[in-house]
Amino acid sequence: MNEPLADRECPDQPQADWTPSEFADLYAEHSKAIFYLALRFLGDPQKAEDATHDVFLKAFRKMDQFRGEASWRTWLYRIAINHCRNLQQSWNERHMFSNADEAVWENAVAQSDSPFRVLETKELGERIQKALDALPGEYRLLLLLIADEQLSYEEVGTLTEQSGDAVRGKLHRARKAFAVLFKKTE
Amino acid sequence: MKQQKKLNSEQQQEQIAEHKVEQREGHEFASVEAVLRFDAAQTKVPSGVAERLQKSSKDLPPPPRSWWERLFKR
């Protein structure tokens, strides 16, 4: 079962409540995306595991609030982003975004234009995490969301409360910043 | 003798496998998104999450469908 539940054929006898197997389908389809977002956003596998559990439990309790205006994936991402942000607010931000940081990335165009070369994929996750951790939270979130091929620029904009055009503009800087930071992890 | 041949064959298979692993480990990605998609594809959700979720939701009432679902799914 890969198609979103909202897109399914209408059953002959609709049930008033969700069945456990329907919720299991929803989990099977979206848990990987939610876990990955939590993992790379929070930077801690245990916290990501807890967050994924909490996000789906919240979703289970709020299923009747899903109005079909967005896809299930987008709805779950919204819960996940709010949850992860709340978790982060209780921690000290490890990195502050400053104009000085941006100037460093802007001046590093040549470095960021080359493709990403990775010799050891087993170290890839670690390098990605280091680069993401050093990014401002907004850039980190934009990159993680836009990497999900199921989301459009407009949907990413809705999730991050800005226009699709604003997303495009910020993504340009976020990509550049990530490229510079990723190369530093070599 | 046959056993020796078999061992050589197994060693060859291992070498081929190792070579394939080395080939797989050298990657070039054209974009940040490609790097992240590759990383996401490699990432597995720990099985403990589903088990915990099943336990946590066991005693909860089944979630009702939203009004629009009940309306449009008739």
Image (tube, coloured by chain):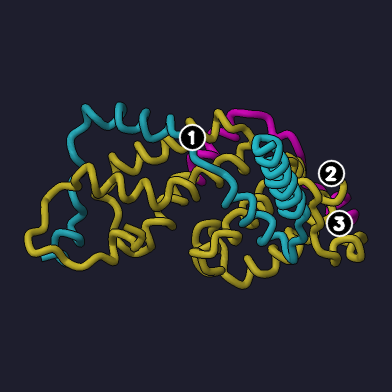
- Name the residue rendered at 50%, 64% in the picture: A151
Q: Which residue in the structure is indicated by mark 1?
A: B46
Within-10-Å neighbours for mark 2: few <14, some 14–19, many 20+: few
Q: Is residue A21 left or right of residue A169?
A: left
For marks 1 and 3, give the CA distance.
35 Å
Instruction: Tell me residue A81's x, y (percent).
Output: 51, 46
Judging by the rendered image, the residue that carries numbered circle 3 is: A105
Identify the secondary structure beneath mark 1: loop
Q: Amino acid at mark 1?
A: Pro
Q: Is residue A121 visible?
A: no
What chain does mark 3 sit on? A
Looking at the image, residue A91 lies above or below residue A176: above
Residue A13 rendering spot, x and y as whole percentages: 7, 59
Q: On the same chain: label 3 and label 2? A: yes
x, y percentage for residue A23? 28, 46
**Residues in magenta?**
A81-105
Mark 3 or mark 2: whose residue is earlier in sequence? 3
Q: Colour of chain A?
A: yellow
Give the mark toward the camera: 1 or 3: 1
Distance from disc 3 to disc 2, alpha carbons, whole Å, reads: 15 Å
Chain under disc 1: B
- C-beta proximity under 8 Å, tags 1 and 3: no
Residue A185: mark in rendering: 2
Q: Is A90 contained in the magenta span?
A: yes
Crowdedness near tag 1: few (<14), some (14–19) or many (≥20) residues, C-alpha within 10 Å: some
Quadrant hosting residue A147: bottom right
- Predominant secondary structure, magenta span: helix
Identified by mark 3, the residue type is Trp
Amino acid at circle 2: Thr
Q: Position of A16 compared to A143: left or right?
A: left
Chain B drawing hue: cyan
